[in-house]
Image (cartoon, grey):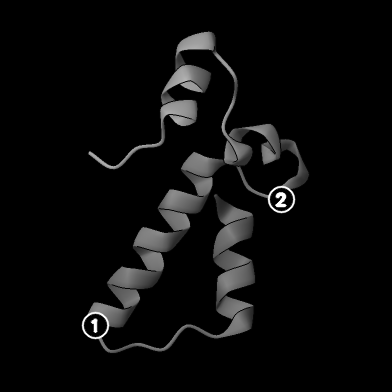
Amino acid sequence: FGIPHSTLCDQIQGIPTCKQAHEHEHLLMSNQEDVLVEWIKGMGRRGLPVTQEMLSQHAGNI
């Protein structure tokens, strides 16, 4: 599958991924980021551009 052996060993030992280890430094949690990304994609499918203001407002509502 192309996954490094060290990655598999880390997962077995319960060592967090880089993303998990630094999640506390982010403004949004991963699930909140996912919601925001889906909203942005939905806006794009409708042909509606997302401004910085819209993005900030929507992120604040999550």
Q: Secondary structure at mark 1?
A: loop
Instruction: Give the vertical position of 62 relative to 24 (above or below).
Output: below
Q: Residues within 10 Å of mark 2 (few under 14, many from 20)?
A: few
For disc 1, the marked residue is 46
Percent from the top left, x then y, of residue 30? 52, 42
Q: Residue furthest front?
A: 5
Report the residue at 41% width, 36% height from top. 4
Instruction: Give the vertical position of 25 relative to 15 (above or below).
Output: below
Instruction: Give the vertical position of 21 relative to 15 (above or below).
Output: below
The disc label shown at residue 27, or none: 2
Instruction: Give the vertical position of 45 relative to 60 (above or below).
Output: below
Kindly identify the amino acid type of the residue bearing the numbered disc 1: Arg
Kindly identify the amino acid type of the residue bearing the numbered disc 2: Leu
Q: Residue furthest top?
A: 13
Report the residue at 22% width, 38% height from top. 1
Q: Residues within 10 Å of mark 1 (few under 14, many from 20)?
A: few
Q: Is residue 25 left or right of residue 12?
A: right
Percent from the top left, x then y, of residue 53? 63, 80
Q: Secondary structure at mark 2?
A: loop
The quarter of the displayed image where residue 8 is located:
top left
Closer to the camera in the image, 18 or 59: 18
CA gap between label 2 and label 1 equals 27 Å
Report the residue at 77% width, 44% height from top. 25
